[in-house]
Image (spheres, coloured by chain):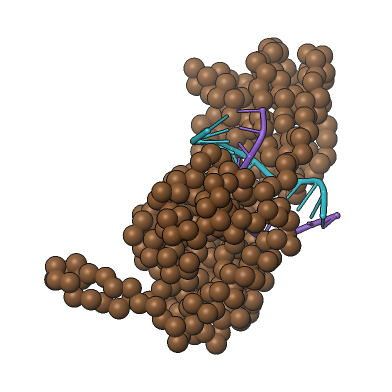
Chain colours: A brown, B cyan, C purple
Amino acid sequence: MIPLICRWYREHRRDLPWRQGKNAYHTWVSEIMLQQTRVEAVIPYYERFLSELPTVQALAACPEDRLLKLWEGLGYYNRVRNMQKAARIVTDGAGTELEKYFSGAPEIPGRQEETEIVKALLALPGIGNYTAGAIASIAFDLPVPAVDGNVLRVLSRVWGDNRDIMKQSVRRSYEQALEKAMRTVFSDKNTDVIQTEDSENNKSAQMVEYLLPGDLNQGFMDLGALVCIPNGSPLCGQCPLGERRLCRAHISGREQEFPVKEQKKARKIEHRTILLIHDGKKVVLRRRPEKGLLASMYEFPNYYGILNRKQVLQEVKDMGMNPVRVRKLEPSKHIFSHIEWHMTGYEVLMEENEGRTTGCLYQKPATSPWILAEAAEVRTKYAIPSAYEAYASLLGRMIDG
DNA sequence: AAGTCGGGGAG
DNA sequence: CTCCCAGACTT
């Protein structure tokens, strides 16, 4: 099965930005972005991120607000904070031996160093079993599995496995099974060769190429994305395993029954009130706490529950502003994985605050800091979660015209 | 083992 | 609407 997937991958692989050349830092960045995120969503972020932070050293040195702005809209913002922490560990030198692998020329570690490399990767924040395996196999050619949703879906169908793939015990058993198989197939003594044509000579000169662990792991990904797809019917006619009767689900016509997954719990609903406080030129923004949901990102002042006009006026006065006019805005809804925000908004026109950019007149700055942001900078400088998009869009119309 | 952490595209 | 995505971390 493994050689079949490797060969299928060489023939059908998608041409993706992070698949040009072999660069461990590039692989790392792409794998972090791709956690729970689709390829199409990642591509533009990946290009922008690498053009601004082309090296692990540049990542280590990037200011946090700029880092969050580069990640704005991708979600799971701890991913990028953890990646920067890891970059600082790597470039510190004191931490691991990984620095040479993540900077400079591509250097492939020997098999003897395999367990050490994987262990060092796993020790970095933001890198778990999957990502360590992906980097080790794709960038370093090490025979380590990278078990993600694609692998679980493909293999649960191939094996007709009716266990719940959400259970970590099941994931572990897949990792162990794959690791054992990969050690055998990718061992130095069993180098299956692939015959390929030499395109330059246009002759059928045969080159010897070896099956690579990275091709298997990426083969699972592309197979899962293009053929063995979730939701609906997989395209078994295009599958290298289907016609060879290597897939139990396909043999018995039960493709739809796998993978088995326990259904998720219902989301919690939260009502919130969003305030667009502005003077026609500047708008009030707030920085979220450093932990929890949307940590350290910027937002419009907002409050739990639905406030009426009187309460809104009181809140604005408590912030030290002089409100002139209050107007109710259209409600808006935003859905997170586990929470649903039902928002209502108010536009609050306030007196001009020339000269003031930050401050808190009636509250301690440490507990409720706010800033007066230039309208143009709201979009260019501050990382604002997509949850506020409806109101950010309204604000643009209020201030710019 | 269960909960937290985003956002968007497809069915 | 629901599901799922190249998951990791905390409790």
Q: Residue at x 33, y 73 (%)?
A: A194
The furthest residue to the front: A252
Q: Position of residue A201 (x, y in %)?
A: 14, 71
Please indicate whether residue A374 sits to the left or right of residue A270 in the image: left
Location of residue A177 by image quarter? bottom right
Residue A112 or residue A120, whichever sits in front: A112
- Above or below — where is A103 with respect to A63? below
Please indicate whether residue A58 sits to the left or right of residue A282 in the image: left
Q: Residue at x 51, y 41 (%)?
A: A233
Q: Is residue A357 visible?
A: no
Location of residue A122 by image quarter? bottom right
Location of residue A370 by image quarter? top right
Number of numbered discs on residues: 0
Residue A384 or residue A134, whichever sits in front: A134
Q: Position of residue A57 (x, y in %)?
A: 51, 67
Q: Position of residue A223 (x, y in %)?
A: 46, 54
Please indicate whether residue B10 sits to the left or right of residue A162 in the image: left
Residue A211 or residue A395, whichever sits in front: A211
Q: Residue at x 59, y 76 (%)?
A: A180
Q: Residue at x 83, y 35 (%)?
A: A363
- Above or below — where is A319 with respect to A198? above
Q: Is residue A260 visible?
A: yes
- Above or below — where is B11 with respect to A2? above
Residue B11 or residue A148, whichever sits in front: B11
Q: Position of residue A102 (x, y in %)?
A: 50, 72
